[in-house]
Amino acid sequence: MLTFLFLIRAVLGNKVRQFLLDFHQSVDFFVPDVCFEDAEKYLPVIFKKRSVFSQMGLEVLFKLQCILQIVDTKYLSRTCY
């Protein structure tokens, strides 16, 4: 189960994103929908603080969505996320 911070690192850095790309065909990466929604919400704030155009970061996040399994939180125990 991936977390909000893992998603942020996948967008902002190379190592986590490359890890996802390297292993997505052999491993299912599950992300609670609230983590994905939080990443979508807070990435523009992070980019604004860094004086960087946020649209590119959001595009990376949405492209990663293709290799992630977004899970509705109503099916998860509260301790999972």
Image (spheres, grey):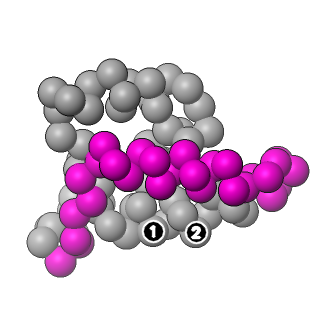
- Mark 1 is surrounded, within 10 Å at the Cα level, by few (under 14), some (14 to 19) or many (20 or more) other residues, namely few
Q: Give residue 3's mark.
A: none
- Mark 2 is surrounded, within 10 Å at the Cα level, by few (under 14), some (14 to 19) or many (20 or more) other residues, namely few
Q: Looking at numbered disc 1 in the image, what kind of residue is underneath it?
A: Glu
Q: Residue at x 36, y 31 (%)?
A: 20
Locate residue 71: give its quadrant: bottom left
Q: Are marks 1 and 2 in contact (CB under 8 Å)?
A: yes
Q: Is residue 6 one of those drawn in magenta?
A: no
Q: Is residue 72 left or right of residue 35?
A: left
Q: Give residue 41's mark.
A: 2
Q: Looking at numbered disc 2 in the image, what kind of residue is underneath it?
A: Lys
Residue bounds of the magenta highlight: 47-74
On the image, the x and y values in percent for residue 75 come to: 12, 72
Q: Residue at x 58, y 69 (%)?
A: 41
Q: Is residue 79 left or right of residue 6?
A: left
Q: Is residue 60 one of those drawn in magenta?
A: yes
Does 35 sit above or below residue 19?
A: below
The answer, for residue 20, to whether it is visible in the render is: yes
| Mark-to-mark CA distance, 1 and 2 | 6 Å
User: Which residue does the numbered mark 1 point to in the structure image?
Assistant: 37
- Prevalent SS, magenta region: helix
On the image, the x and y values in percent for residue 22 come to: 33, 22
SS label for mark 1: helix
Q: Residue at x 20, y 29 (%)?
A: 25
Q: Is residue 70 left or right of residue 41?
A: left
